[in-house]
Amino acid sequence: MDERSDEDVVDEDIVDEDWYGNELAGTRFSSVRFSRVDFTEVRTRNVIFDDCRFANCAFNVSEHRETAFIGCTFARDSFFSATLDGCKLSGSTFVDCEFHPITIKGGLWQGVVIRGGDLTKIDFSGVDLRDADLSESDLSGARLDDCNLAFANLRNTRLIDASLIGAKLDGIDLSAAQLGNTQVDLAGAISVAATYGAVLR
């Protein structure tokens, strides 16, 4: 098993490489373009990916702890059985990615873009999703308990059977989302009511 640490990688193309089972710690990748790289069972801790692109990569059964993917683009990647624990994904964009199943434990996902994604039944509890663009995505059955969803874009987002208990919903237009048996607490109910012009007394 390879171990890579304390190495800065800048402005490189990494194509068709097998990183199976590698352990990465303290490494920084800046403006690196990964294409068809196998990250299966890779373990990362305190790694920074800044403005990187991942195309047709496999993150299957990989584990990422306190790792940052800042302003990255993920296109047609697989996260089958991946774990993201306390990770920062601020400003990153996901296009045509497969997320099922995935384990997410908290983290800062502010400004993340996942338009039209299949996010059904995923547990996002406690994730900071401020300013995220989740428009057109399917979050049916998902758990968004205690998430910060302030000013997130939920246009045509399916929230059927989703749970938003304890979620912060400031600045959200829930009338643009598709609700049905959506679970909310009192604060959430007030937000929903306000969206439709009602006032709880």
Image (spheres, helix red, strand yellow):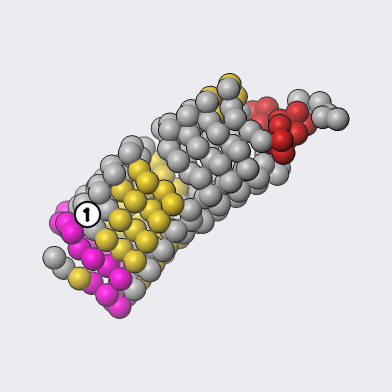
Label 1 Cα neighbours within 10 Å, binned few <14 / some 14-19 / many ≥20: many
The image shows residue 34 at horizontal and vertical percentages of: 27, 56
Q: Quadrant of residue 179?
A: top right
Taking the magenta stretch, the answer to whether it contains residue 138 is no
Instruction: Check the image and report above or below for 74 versus 155.
Output: below
Which residue shows up at 60% across the image and 38% down it? 165
Q: Secondary structure at mark 1?
A: loop
Taking the magenta stretch, the answer to whether it contains residue 16 is yes
Residue 199 visible from this viewpoint: yes
Which residue shows up at 50% across the image and 37% down it? 143
Instruction: Check the image and report above or below for 171 versus 73.
Output: above
User: What stretch of residues is rendered in magenta?
Assistant: 4-25
Seen from this angle, which residue lies furthest right? 201
Which residue shows up at 59% across the image and 37% down it? 164
How many numbered discs, if any?
1
Tell me the quarter of the image containing the N terminus: bottom left
Tell me the quarter of the image containing the C terminus: top right
- Residue type marked 1: Glu
